[in-house]
Amino acid sequence: MTTPNTKRDYSLIGPETKRAHERGLVSAQWHESPIPRPRLKELMRRKDGPAIRHTLLWFALIIGSGVTAALTWGTWWCVPALFVYGTLYGSTSDSRWHECGHRTAFKTVWMNDVVYYIASFMVLREATAWRWNHTRHHTDTLIVGRDLEIAVPRPPSLFMVCSKFFALPSGLRELAKIIRHCLGRLNAVEKDYIPESEQRRVFIEARVYAAIYAATIACAVATRSFLPLMLVGLPSFYGAWLVVLFGLTQHAGLAEDVLDHRLNCRTVYMNPISRYLYWNMNYHVEHHMFPLVPYHALPALHEALKADMPPAYRSLWDAYREIIPALLRQAKDSTYYVKRPLPAGAAVQGGVA
Amino acid sequence: MNGGWIPACKADDVGAEDVIRFDHAGRTFAIYRTADDKYYATDGLCTHEKVHLARGFVTDSIIECPKHNGRFDFTTGEAKGAPACVNLKTYPVKIESGQVFLQLD
């Protein structure tokens, strides 16, 4: 029985995992909003053009801000340059990681994979391990005991939520994982979601990450400067604020253990600059419901599904007006969650919040 | 017997560069039609998490699973990379009088 003070076990090998199986919440059938197959096929169609343009601009912005930071290093001008560089490196890499991980951003598969590996390093996620982690997130979204990507476990620690804005302690945990994987070891949870055939790849990638970090540290020591570390490695921490600001809107405060993405995801309207930085991940209900639709088609998918969806949030602020009070309340009452209103007559699929 | 050939659907039931589901004797299959009107058949469930491939996306000779984007070459059944790591079983297909037949084992 869940009481207001109950702390649930969010690991993948605890009692909640068994409970999720018993309740039929594992690999279950989720609600899909109706959309004609020909329209869905149109929206699923892949293109290289948008992602090539957006990625070239992204690299140009990262290189431009990085060079500016290096040239102004030692002056106050390097602060805004590093702010821009760090945010692009540590935050916007998240959405590139995400879209290319699904291999939907580009039509050409290898382009997805190249950007995926680069973005994985920047956002401090081991590429293969996180691919499987995210796969599980899509199978069992916000199912406790199954989904490792639940950003705000209940009851939330407000200190932990705030520390996320600097990738703490998650970034430190990732570094510890890299060291463990360099030694060729996986823990029990990782063995649960990473197939044996993929485990060797995890160890190789960890060693590549470690080699890059070692080279960066050696460069910093040789030049007696922190600059190399401010350009490689540390931006994953000091530049993480934006990914958390955007990312918390995806699921924070919403229902756990339901089989309907309309109830555990948010779609939030954002301005064009934010949508570029976030690659339209603000259309999060639509993404979870139809993950084959590329990011550039998500606004059109949103229009196609609108009648079967809860109302979208008008802005980031509109979303946070709900999220902040919800987290404050959950800190005292872990059974509380935000109930999303479904359109009149909409069917609710399985599961109990 | 007729060599194990089972009538599955009309050829026109499958759109160009698309896939449909066919259930038979407690089993489920996916029947594909390419852009140049060639037909193929595989097991109907993704080898990764048993999701129906008929809700997926066909491009050229690739079927992409609707849940996790696992990709298979449906002409050979070959899994094309994580999270699809185990090949799909394929079945011979023939078209006769506008009807698609599958040869089951």
Image (tube, rainbow, N blue to C red):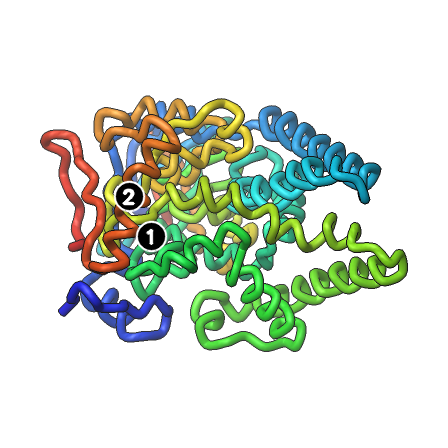
Residue A136: image location, x then y, percent: 40, 57
Would residue A111 be found to the left or right of residue A314 on screen? Answer: right
Tell me the residue at 42%/24% (across/down). A42
Is residue A24 shown above or below B95? below
Residue A19: image location, x then y, percent: 22, 69
Pointer 2: what residue? A261
Quadrant (top left/top right/bottom left/bottom right) for the C terminus of chain B: bottom left
Camera sees residue B31: no
Would residue A124 be found to the left or right of residue A271 on screen? Answer: right
Three-letter code, disc 2? His
Residue B43: image location, x then y, percent: 38, 52
Q: Residue furthest right?
A: A222
Look at the numbered discs 1 and 2 and tell me whether their residues touch, using CB distance below 8 Å. yes
Pointer 1: what residue? A141
Tell me the residue at 13%/69% (across/down). A1
Count of marks placed on residues: 2
Would residue B10 be found to the left or right of residue A161 on screen? Answer: left
Tell me the residue at 79%/62% (across/down). A217
Task: Identify the secondary structure beneath mark 1.
Answer: loop
Residue B68 is tagged as none
| Local crowd size for mark 1, using a 10 Å CA cut-off: few (<14), some (14–19), many (≥20) | many
Q: Residue furthest front?
A: A76
Whole-angstrom CA distance, mark 1 to mark 2, is 8 Å
Is residue A125 shown above or below A96? below
